[in-house]
Image (cartoon, rainbow, N blue to C red):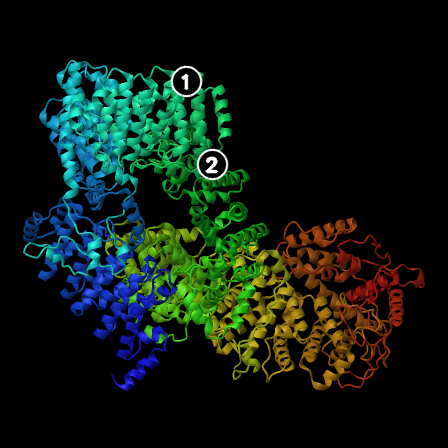
Amino acid sequence: MSTEDEKLLKEAKKLPWEDRLLHKNWKVRNDANIDLAALCDGITDPKDPRIRELGHFFKKTVADSNAPVQDKALDALIAYLKAADADAGRFAKEVCDSVVAKCLTGRPKTVEKAQIVFMLWVELEAVDVFLDSMEKAIKNKVAKAVVPAIDVMFQALSEFGSKIVPPKRILKMLPELFDHQDQNVRASSKGLTLELCRWIGRDPVKSILFEKMRDTMKKELEAELANVTGVAKPTRKIRSEQDKEPEQEVEAEASGSGPSEESAAEVPQEIDEYELVDPVDILTPLEKSGFWNGVKATKWSERKDAVAELTKLASTKRIAPGDFSEICRTLKKLITDVNIAVAVEAVQAIGNLATGLRTNFSASSRFILPVLLEKLKEKKPTMTEALNNTLQAIHKAGCVTLADIVEDVKVAVKNKVPLVRSLTLNWVTHCIETSNKAVILKVHKDYVPICMECLNDGTPDVRDAAFSVLAAIAKSVGMRPLEKSLEKLDDVRRKKLSEMIGVSGGGAPTAGAGAPSSGGTVSSAEASDGGFVRRSAASMLSGKKPISAAPAAKKAAPAKTVAGKKADGPSQTKKVEQPEDVEPAEMSLDEIESRIGSLIQADTITQLKSAAWKERLEAITSVKEQVVALQELDKSVEILIRLLCAVPGWTEKNVQVQQQVIEVVSHIASTASKFPKKCVVLCIGGICERVADIKTRAQAMKCLTTFSEAVGPGFIFERMFKIMKEHKNPKVLSEGLLWMVSAVEDFGVGHLKLKDLIDFCKDTGLQSSAAATRNATIKLIGALHKYVGPDIKAFLSDVKPALLSAVDAECEKNPFEGAAAAPKKTVKATDSVSSVSGGGLDSLPREDISGKITPALLKGLESNDWKARLESIEAVSKIVDEANKRIQPTGTVELFGALRARLYDSNKNLITATLTSISALASAMGPAVEKASKGILSDVIKCLGDNKKSTRESTLTTLDAWVAVTHLDKMVPYITASLTDAKLGAEGRKDLFDWLSRQLTGLAEFPDAIQLLRPVAVAMTDKSADVRKAAEACFGDIVRVCGPEMVMKNVRDIQGPALAIVLERLKTHGAFPEVHENTRTVPAGQPLKTGSKIGKSNGHASRHGSRSVSSRAVSAKGSKPEPIMSVQDINIQSQALINVRDSNKAERERIVVRRSKFEELRVEQIQDLENDLMKYFREDLHRRLLSTDFKKQVDGIEMLHRALPTIAKDLIEVIDILLKWFVLRFCESNTSCLLKVLEFLPEFFDTLRNENYTLNESEAYIFFPCLVEKTGHNIEKLREKIRELMKQLIHSYSAAKTFPFILEGLRSRNNRTRIECADLVGYLLDNNGSEISNAQLKSLKDVASLTAERDGDLRKAALNCLATGYKIFGDDIWNFVGKLTEAQKSMIDDRFKYKAREMNKRKEGMPGEARAAALLRRSVRENGSDLAEQSGEVSRSISGPAFTRDIYTPPEAQMERHPMARPSGGVVGPTDWNEALDIITYGSPEQSVEGMKVVCHELAAATNDPEGSLMDELIKDADKLVSCLAAKVANTFDFSLRGASSRSCKYVLNTLMQTFQNKRLAHAVNQRTLDNLITELLLWLLDERVPRMDDGSQLLKALNVLMLKILDNAERTSSFVVLIHLLKPLDPSRWPYPPSNESFASRNMKFSDLVVKCLIKLTKVLQSTIYEVDLDRILQSIHIYLQELGMEEIRRRAGADDKPLRMVKTVLHELVKLRGTAIKGHLSMVPIDMEPQPIILAYIDLNLQTLAAARMLTPTGPVGQTHWGDSMANNPMPATQSADAQLKQELAAIFKKIGDKQTCSIGLYELYRITQLYPKVDIFSQLQNASEAFRTYIRDGLAQMEKNAAAGRTPSSVPMPTPPPSALNLPSPKFAPLSPVHTNSLNDGKSVNTKMDPTSFSLPPSYAEDDMSSSRGQIPVQSDDRFPSGVSSGTLDAIRERMKSIQLASAGNPEPANQPMMQMNVSNEDHESGQPTDKVSAVNPNPVHSGVLPMDEKALSGLQARMERLKSGSMDPL
């Protein structure tokens, strides 16, 4: 190696692993792999954190293009896998895929290493990943890569066995390999098939695979199968089992079991073929075959054929479950068919169904069984054979058990036909022979009496059959169950039975003994010495060199690879020693003496026979000495015991001899390494009798204890039960019980059958008449209580109360100690524990209740009647009580399933009862409840979400019961999942946290509680204070039991505010501050190194201060480094969730295939997706997203969901990757994961829209095809969510762009997809029809073609879609549907006609009208006049940022409704008007479009029927609607300025346009709303950003047209008032933030110019609209404007030619010009008597004089006088003429008001006032052209008004009952309702003329609305060209004096002071307060003469009213 290379390698060693392993120089990569292998070899602890850090490198290193580097990478991977444990399986998928792709086609050595890698993955339990990779490998086109894959599967199966490597998956791979073109592949596949035969048997393999092979292949395999012998045995263990082997070695050496025992113990059971095949549905083809018609046919042949078809279909190996109840009822009838052939066929069909359905046929089998047994009477051989086969099949398949058929057998053996009895018993014999011993032990008590009764039957066949049953029972369980029964038999029958038992049992041992030795294999220990031996599957074939077994490949310490040493527990030993015969055979004394040989001297034996007791004593002493001296005692144990039992025997009378005999037996039992149970049986009877003798009691009890040590106390107790029961001496019973007490204290209860012991105590001990026996029994029960606890009392419930109280007292003396009560003595026998059934550490026995869980009980739990359900629930509790509250889990799975359903019962009381039953079941079942309940705990916890407190309390009680029998760690996963369930509710979460706190309080350490950290942290941010408090208490307990260090290490899963709270709480525990302190002191680069070393080490050692040198303990200096590590873990959370630094989005988009049709992701695409996820997503996130566990995938989505608002911009960079991942989830179709995806996507797309991001083309092609295809998902809930998501995407993406994808969905193979797509096309047409081009509409022919489909739903969807199109396009739709058949045309035409009728009913107009109207509106927008362009004020050159402004929302809109929750499922159309207004007000701009569509539809409908009720309803809401839309204008324009579509802007302007096109609606808008709207529109007309928006020019045109429409149709008075108000400078908050080059002043000037132009438009038409406006309000607004300016400002602006001021003067001038002197009658809202006088008065006088001078107005006096002066005395005629003309003008206006139905009441009231003021005027002379009806109407109206005036009612309180008839020939203008002030303006009083001083007048300096008091000052008027000289203001005194003179002149009264002043109406204050005044004066009895009538009574009356109020003091000072 050159110096440069050495330098390069040296420098490279400093690089991180990733850089070295992926270096561009192959030598660096090679060196890195060598170092990596050395590093992995040095790792001894599989939990070393480096294991996890290095795992993700190998997927790339093994795919290296350089072959030597690849070899080294494989070496490193092998070393890594040897050091790792099963946790490394997380990297298995990616590594195996790389190995399959790159290594199986390499050099032989590479292939061999790749195979080693695969075997190690299997050893690490990654079997599923391994087989997934093999499925990919065998599909490789290169045969060279397929053969190694088959070989490695062969090796894995050969070495690990079928238990680890599931044969089912391999069987599915083989068929395609049989037909491979390469002969090596075919040979290897045959070898793999032969290996499968060794593991699962030939028959399953042949039946599954042979039908898929070619004939030649079958023949070759048939020949090879002949060479397959023996049973295979695994030679290699998975890693987790290897870790346990050292313990097993020790146990094996202690027990001394030899190799034969190991081989016998490890014989694998043959795999059931039934589990290897897939179920077949036969119900569907059976339905199609005409079965039901056939079985009802009258011809027997047709019935037989129908049943034969069923038999044929049912002959499949495995039938899919279904409802076969009706079929079974039919077959039951056919069994008794008159035709024997039909009956036989039916019986055979039942057998096939039983074989194929197995346990799923149980209920049906019990239903049919009585008929089958009854049918045994048939003598036809075919029927008998069929019945026997079917009955045997029913039992073999497990449909019925011996316990199930007892009652049916009892009935059958009493049948009068002998054949039925005999064949039934023969069937029972078969059932017993094929059942296991445990089953027979349970049921033999039922069958033995039946057989004993049948032995007396008169038919020999029946008797023989009964003998066969007894023999079968004896063969299975021994003679003991038959002993009592055989005593009743005579000698002949007993002998025959013994012979039958002997014959039947003779051959059994031989058959059993041969099995273990048939499969000799090499042990793992031998195989581990050599290296890896590559085996080929083809080597199994004949002609190849056979290899009997595969050596192990584990290159590790020999201690870890010892195979065969692991015993499966005591049960395996039991199987080996079970053949031991415990019943000793008879042996004579001579035979004993001959066999004993020289062990005992012959003289000694002779002495033992002596009659002299001394000789016998001497002899037994000698025997004792000789036995003690024996070196090898084990071989002679039995013969010595037999000798002692024979001589002197247990009948010895001498006590001393007896004592010596017992001592010898005790010595033999204690000394022998194995003491046979036969010897115990020989001695036990005599020993029990010796116990009763006080002289030998001590020795006898010691001997029994020695026996217990030798063979276990269980066997001794079992033998003693029988002896003590039957013995006549009560001492035997009582003393035996006392010995049992001592035995329990010595050995505990672990070796006893507690059920038998308790039964013995109850039935024998406590029932004894001897007090000593009862007392001894009570002591025994007390001793048991010490070990098993108070549960034992449940078994004594039926004991007498007196005894029960004594038992309780004894139990108190022996309190329960549980595990603390350790046995004092041990048992030598290896099978002692296994001999126990139902006892042991689980204490008391448990009863099997499966027989009591009947179908009727389960059906009752599902009943519709709540009482029946309650009875069934109570029955469950009763069953538990009857079983002494100790039950086995057997058969309870279905029960728990039924109870789970009741937890969701509609009846709350039943839920509580169910919880009680589940609590009882859990307590009675013990720890086994966790597996038997099948996760019912999660459903129990959900009950905490109930509102009822009692239900929640019952739930907590159930949890208490559950945690008492299982451990809390088993419950934590369920609790964690439930805490994240929103349905749990605040109360439920609080109760659950409180319960958890109580449980954790009693624990000192509980690491599993860390799983609760995340839900507890989330709950600490809950909106409920109780939940937060409970969660914080629980958090404190978690920190206490887990330790702060562990909590700190696990905070990585917490995000958001919860993380801050957790870290804050941790400060109180002293962990977090230290963390930060340590972090600050460590240099920048150091924490990463430290973290990499100890980041994932176990923190237990440091927390407990352990200094152990375990390989798992990294740091030896306490826990100081641990907090630093925790910070590094937290730093992962602080990293960005998405890394977009090197995002190459453009390149990824370039390779996207743009295809509308959906295709599932290919393997390489999935691989690329995984690589991208790992590259761009944070480690904890991509780990979850790439997990195969859907729960982790859901966690990943939740992480994205929580972070969505903050990572939106980053997500846009990787959106294509995320969309691909969503597509992958859609393809996998996991329901839970899909629901979470569909919950996330709507908010995701909403976020994108808020970020102004729209999917581009490549992203659409990634996602839309899949989403469209999945719209037809088979789950309705998912379909709904996908449907809503599609609608949301249509709005956010583009209807036109989405249309092609939906059309492609119409071609899907899935009918549901096509139906959904047809509905979506209809939705598009209805909501976005204008966006779809005509070219796209031609694709409607695809929809039309669906009308020819057979599926009715599909046709209906297509017709609905076309009907929607017809509604939009009308008859034009026929241009788009293409060529159709006549039938299709007819069908579509009928649907169109129905649609037209439906539209007519709903008043939706005619089809096609909506589209035409839309086109018309579009043309109006495009061609309307442009107000802003005319102003010339809008600049297009300024380009600034999109600023926002404060959007004014009216208080009414704010207060009327609460904000509407934002829809999460996409944009959904509102259903009614109110909901539409809500969506417009509170929804986003895009969402509000849906509301505006509804509004436009309603407006169009109302416009079509202007007189209808709908219009009246809309008028009520018109102001509210415009208020909402005015606020929405700014929202939509701001939204569009951020880059979004201008669609929402167009909609809001269009809706406003439709509203203001209708005058009635426009008039209903109040002034404030109009102010907001006009302000918004004018501001946006001036906004220079609008032209740069999408369709900006069109928006400007639309704004102009809308503004003009508002000016035309809105209530003109409000328009004038609003515009005059807007002439003032605008509040700066209403403007966007100004750019740097433009001030607010310049903007206000532009705004004022626009307002001026609007006022010009209104003023131009004043002449024609003067009677439509309220002049009082307009004059008031002008007054306010002028007063706010003040005289100084007016003078200043006049010099500057100010446009706003000039416009106000123009308006006032026009009003004075049109109304003349009558204008003064409209000053009711102007405080004309204020000091100084209002400015407006001066301007009115000035205009009157100017107009009169220009002869544009008839003056009331000389030019020098104002209208406030009086010139009647000097010039009466002009005044009279002017008054007459004015009166006629007023009357004409009033008649027009009366002619309008809306203003008729006001007009009549005004006319009434005129008649009161001018009683001599003939008003009817003005009505000569009116109709008589109109005149009558006026007369009646005036009479009514007079009555109202007398009653003091205002006109508004008494509306006219009917509208007036047409008054005049000319149409009257329509008037808006007048305000109360305006209504009474005519009656304010008489006007007073005041002579003005021509030299000066007073003007107030300022006017403020909030301060009505103004400063008084005399301000001289400067000379101005607009003010003629001599114009001045009069004083208030002058006005008063002038009024008096006018009154005197008009009344002709020389004493004006005595004449009362007339007051004709109430004051303004009275009107405003709504209270009418009671001061109504009579009309002056001396009215004025017509020749001197005042010129303007209206003006005089207004002025007079104000003067009177001022005099009376009722008017507040201004």
Residue 1306 at x, y percent in the picture? 29, 59
Few, some or many residues within 10 Å of mark 1 (<14, 14–19, 20+): some
Left or right: 728 as drawn, with respect to 137: right
The residue lying toward the viewer, choosing from 1097 and 461, is: 1097
Residue 725 at x, y percent in the picture? 34, 19
In the rendered image, is residue 1328 in sight? no
Quadrant where the image shows the C terminus: bottom right
Residue 1038 vertical placement versus 770 (above, below): below
Residue 664 at x, y percent in the picture? 29, 28
Look at label 2 and name its amino acid: Glu
Nearest to N terminus: mark 1 or mark 2: 1
The structure residue drawn at horizontal position 38% and vertical position 74%, both measured from the top left corner, is 1143
| Label 1 – label 2 distance at C-alpha | 28 Å
Residue 1177 vertical placement versus 717 (above, below): below
Residue 152 vertical placement versus 476 (above, below): below
The residue lying toward the viewer, choosing from 1607 and 1632, is: 1632
Judged from the image, the secondary structure of the residue bearing numbered disc 1 is: loop
Residue 342 vertical placement versus 261 (above, below): above
In the rendered image, is residue 31 in sight? yes
The residue lying toward the viewer, choosing from 1368 and 1492, is: 1492
Q: Which mark is on residue 504?
A: none
Residue 1475 at x, y percent in the picture? 52, 55
| Front label number (1 vs 2) | 2
Q: How many marks?
A: 2
Look at label 1 and name its amino acid: Gln
Judged from the image, the secondary structure of the residue bearing numbered disc 2 is: loop
The residue lying toward the viewer, choosing from 1073 and 1852, is: 1073
**Mark 1 highlights which residue?**
767
**Mark 2 highlights which residue?**
817
